[in-house]
Image (cartoon, coloured by chain):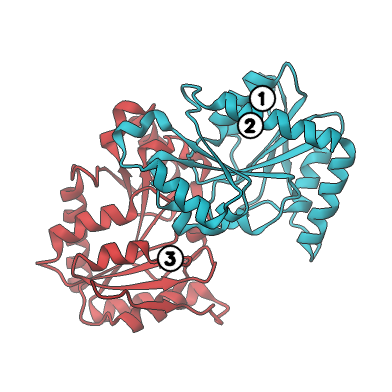
Chain colours: A cyan, B red
Amino acid sequence: MDSVKILEVKKSVLEDNDADAVVLRDSLKGDGVLYVNIMSSPGSGKTTTLSAVIRRLKDELKIGVMEADIDSDVDAKTIQDLGVRSIQLHTGGMCHLDADMSRQGLKEMGSEDLDLVFLENVGNLVCPAEFDTGAQENVCILSVPEGDDKPLKYPLIFTKCNLVLVNKIDALPVFDFDMDAVKEHIAKINPNAKVIPISAKTGEGVDEFCDWLRDKVKEQKNG
Amino acid sequence: MDSVKILEVKKSVLEDNDADAVVLRDSLKGDGVLYVNIMSSPGSGKTTTLSAVIRRLKDELKIGVMEADIDSDVDAKTIQDLGVRSIQLHTGGMCHLDADMSRQGLKEMGSEDLDLVFLENVGNLVCPAEFDTGAQENVCILSVPEGDDKPLKYPLIFTKCNLVLVNKIDALPVFDFDMDAVKEHIAKINPNAKVIPISAKTGEGVDEFCDWLRDKVKEQKNG
């Protein structure tokens, strides 16, 4: 296995992150690249979900992955072994990524010829929601063991997402998790959010997420 | 059920949080109050663990709980129903508590006559580790579904803790979680940290955590 390419992202000097995110989003749209920001708590299954998706899509789409991590390279190694372009972004203790940090990563990895770039954000259900990364699509993963009350407790991240993946549904029998309740909570906060229950481990629901990604890639190229 | 007392904590104006935390810690020591800061990812079981502990200890110790939450009162209601003194701290979007915010909560709740005060910190494995709350003891909960690699990925919080509770061990049969590996990872980062595997749901291991708390309360009063 080759060693993982690591970029120590620098703290942004731009004061207006929202404006900068719009510029980045437009630029990616011009290149026909779909940029998807994946957010969740630590251990909700971001890397496992990405791995399952990449295995299904890597022969039809050119995929890149930016793995944001405070200072390890555990996930980047996993992703690199799947044979897609990847880079490790070290945030130097910072708890989120913003648009300029995204741009640094995209440039270093090389994204212009890609169809689909994922950012695996820092595992954190609070801070990443406050910073627009310039992604066209924001996806939140909530896993069954975390509990169905999380949209009530961390509402901001659920308002920012176009799609919520409810992961680890293979573990439903051992947890008190009410899927209808979680869907209701999400619908109240963000009526436009789509919810797909999945198990990244068994593969259940992953094809539906792949179909959603295929549609979004098409929109990005044609729209 | 009475309504939950809510305090909107104000952003601290003190520049030196570390120094302020020392002052708060000394003051609590003077009052013979043990202040325990509980940190974890969202959904690791902080509230369920506290509930299990409170049921076991509330007749022998005077307990207070500060529930930090971004803007809900889901957990505070659960704790209040157990019949101990409690207060909800709304952080107004902030992802952590610091010493001065702790002090605001302790003052509003009234802590001088208590033996043991818990802070249920914001569910976040990143930011709370960076701010000393003035607590004498820092406890981190890592739950089995999050995975045994978390000490590698979020090392700072594990260096700050005197005790790591590995929760949801009742779910071990359905997850690939290596308890020996997690203990090794923690020992490498923080050789002094004690690790107790528990299930807040079934009660397994909770008595050992209660014994640890009893010892720390005694130390605080006598030491």
Answer with left or right where residue B94 lies relative to residue B28: right
| Chain identity of mark 1 | A
Give the Cα distance between marks 1 and 2: 6 Å
Could you tell me if the residues under marks 1 and 2 are in contact, i.e. CB atoms within 8 Å? yes
Q: Residue at x 14, y 69 (%)?
A: B61
Q: Nearer the viewer, mark 3 or mark 1?
A: 3
So how many labels did they put on this image? Answer: 3
Query: Looking at the picture, which amino acid does disc 3 mark?
Result: Ser
Q: Position of residue B88 (x, y in %)?
A: 37, 72
Is B207 displayed left or right of A28 in the figure? Answer: left
Write down the quadrant of residue B122 in the picture: bottom left
Residue B125 appearing in the image: no
Q: Please state if B154 lies on the left or on the right of B81 as rendered.
A: right
Name the residue tied to disc 2.
A76
Residue B200 x, y percent position in the rendering:
24, 47
Q: Nearer the viewer, residue B193 or A47?
A: A47
Residue at mark 3 to residue at mark 2: CA–CA distance:
35 Å
Name the residue at 45% across, 72% down.
B90
The residue under the point 46% across, 21% down is A202
Q: Amino acid at mark 2?
A: Ala
